[in-house]
Amino acid sequence: MKQVVLDAQIRMEAGKGIARRLRRAGQIPGVLYGPKIHPISLSIDAHKFNKLLSSARGERILFILNLKGNGDSGRHTALIKELQLHPVTDQIRHIDFYEILMDEEVEVEVPIVTVGEARGVEQDMGVLEIIQRTVRISCLPMAIPKEIEIDVSGLGLGDAIHVADIAHQEGIRLLDDPETTLITVGSPEVEKGEREEGPELEEEMEEGPTR
């Protein structure tokens, strides 16, 4: 996991008007909270933050927030809990930071990455279906993986991989139900049949009810 120091300005004012003013000034409004601190409103330099995210290339970042302002200062270790994005431009509009302690486990969601070519896809023209793209885990902050790889090469038609099938990793606990389905290989005939039924259904809907 990548660790970076990030300056953050403590702010006493809140509200939509303040948030708009901060964004116009090149700042991103945010909040830092956690089980052992009261929420702290803050702002981050947008250019610096976006540059950090770009350089991380998808790797999770552990932030050392250097808080300043209102006659106070301090450092807090935190992870990003949520990024609120603009629905059109995808610009970051708000950041939720969650304070953590390095010697205590945290719960996070980690993406799933498939490895290999499923036998049912390669030999039987099946369709690999990703049912769930992340899994919830609990571990120490420095043990958080960028992703969890799942080998799908042994999957035949109708086979599935569940949470219980994920290989054990030292120091990481899986929190999702062990029976949760993550990946399956579906039959191409079923999908073809679904596509053939589609136009008939649309035609009936267009015609409307008979009077």
Image (spheres, rainbow, N blue to C red):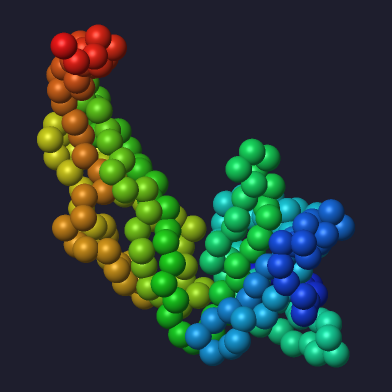
The picture quadrant where one finds residue 79 is bottom right
65 to 155, vertically: above or below: below
In this orientation, does residue 161 appear? yes
Q: Nearer the viewer, residue 31 or 77?
A: 31
Q: Is residue 163 left or right of residue 20?
A: left
Q: How many marks?
A: 0
- On the rendered structure, is 184 left or right of 174? left
Q: Position of residue 160 (x, y in %)?
A: 17, 44
Please provide percent x and percent y for residue 8.
77, 73
| Residue 196 shows in this picture | no
Q: Residue furthest front?
A: 211
In the rendering, at what x and y percent does residue 180 appear? Answer: 21, 55
State whether residue 200 is above or below residue 184. Answer: above
Judge by depth and name the residue closer to the eye, 71 or 53.
Answer: 71
Q: Quadrant of the C terminus?
A: top left
Q: Residue at x 64, y 47 (%)?
A: 86
User: Residue 131, percent across and down?
Assistant: 28, 43
User: In the image, what residue occupies the spot 60% across and 67% down?
Assistant: 96
Image point (16%, 58%), residue name: 179
Residue at 19%, 15% in the rendered image? 209
Q: Quadrant of the N terminus?
A: bottom right
Position of residue 23 relative to residue 204, above or below, is: below
Nearest to the observer: residue 100 or residue 25: 25
